[in-house]
Amino acid sequence: MYSNSFQFILALITLSNFFIFGCTSDESYDNSDFISEVETNLPASVPFVAVGGSNSSEGNGYILLTSDDGNTWENISLDSLNLTSGSRFHDVTYGNGMYVVVGDSGNILYSKNSKEWSRIKLEGSKSHGYVSIAYGKNRFFATGGTNSTDSVILIESNDGINWNSSFSKLGIEVGKSIEFCMDMFFLITDNRCLKSEDETNWGTSVTCNFSGNPKQYCINNKIHVTESSNAIYKSLDGNSFTSITFPSTSSTGIAYGNDLYVVGSSANIYYNLSFISVGWSQTTNFPDNSGTILSIIYRKSKFIAAGGNSIIYKSDDGLNWTRVNSGTSNTINSIY
């Protein structure tokens, strides 16, 4: 926790900013009694899982790590699954008592214990890469695609094993991010944003204007978005997004815990008491800037951040970070 003087200074900054910008779109949230979406109803015994890999033929291909405490990571051998070298996993989620991982070439993995994994290989119009996966209402959704007429950009599963695309051909576009929040699913593609309240109809458009590689996060039951620019976004109602000025040239991950919003960037981690355009501070004792932060979570009363060049960092308070040995030399794209 912070010293009283530190809390007082941050409180003054936040209050003064709120007074100046009071009724603008940068209003702060009531974070009382908040539990992070990724942590909701999740037992502390559920291990961390990190996934990634290399898209180079010289790399080790897919990688999958697991840790009980965020300090010691085990690199799980996937040799028996016959995965293609030079490919990657892109995202991981947890639901229905199991982890589900999505990656290149239609490869999906699932596990109930984080150490024993089974592989599903999607074929035909579903055989391309998937970059994002979400779980809600007892259903998994994954998105990706190749921007061609025969490419399915959205698939769904009730069990994480059997995947359906019967209602998933939304157009000639590529899926970028899928998230469950506000009791509905939100989908970002390369040219529009959609939401579905019944998991079947995706005709409801959401006003958005993202660039780069947007990724969604459900925090305090509100959708937040990062992208490859100096802006981060939030939606209070699920119908439109408000841009929040961010002090770095890129934003690459958002987590909330210990009364702080924590956002990753290409070289450091920033924190703020409120999700507004002012008040962001850069951590002063970050271990190094050897790789871009690509994913941040808050679980088990600690932050875990990971990204390029095999980096994994941990922090108990969001301010003081240490680097831990990931046991891999490849990029880590996502942590749960």
Image (cartoon, rainbow, N blue to C red):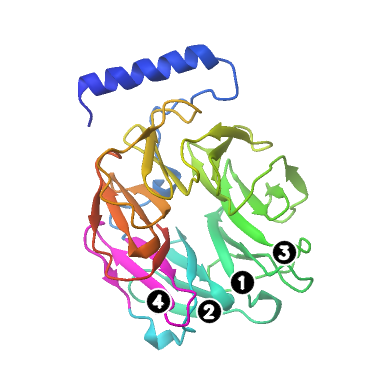
Residue range corresponding to the magenta coloring: 48-76
In the image: residue 59, left or right of residue 23: left
Q: Nearer the viewer, residue 332 or 1?
A: 332
As measured in the structure, the alpha-carbon distance from the residue carrying label 2 to the one carrying label 4 is: 10 Å
Which residue bears the numbered disc 3?
168
In the image: residue 177, left or right of residue 289: right
- Tell whether label 2 touches label 1 (CB within 8 Å): yes
Residues packed near mark 3 inside 10 Å, few (<14), some (14 to 19) or many (20 plus): some
- Tell whether label 4 touches label 3 (CB within 8 Å): no
The answer to whether residue 138 is visible is: no
Residue 15 position in % (x across, y down): 42, 15
In the image: residue 175, left or right of residue 325: right
- Mark 3 is on which residue type? Ser
- Mark 2 is on which residue type? Ile
The residue depicted at 33 percent of the width and 80 percent of the height is 77
Residue 68: say if magenta.
yes
Q: Indicate whether 205 appears above or below 272.
A: below
Q: Nearer the viewer, residue 198 or 53?
A: 53
Question: Tag 4 or tag 1, which sits nearer the N-term?
Answer: 4
Residues packed near mark 2 inside 10 Å, few (<14), some (14 to 19) or many (20 plus): some
Quadrant housing the C terminus: bottom left
Which residue bears the numbered disc 1?
163
As measured in the structure, the alpha-carbon distance from the residue carrying label 1 to the one carrying label 2 is: 9 Å
As measured in the structure, the alpha-carbon distance from the residue carrying label 3 to the one carrying label 4 is: 26 Å
Residue 285 position in % (x across, y down): 24, 41
SS category of the residue bearing label 1: loop
Residue 121: say if magenta.
no
Question: Tag 3 or tag 2, which sits nearer the N-term?
Answer: 2
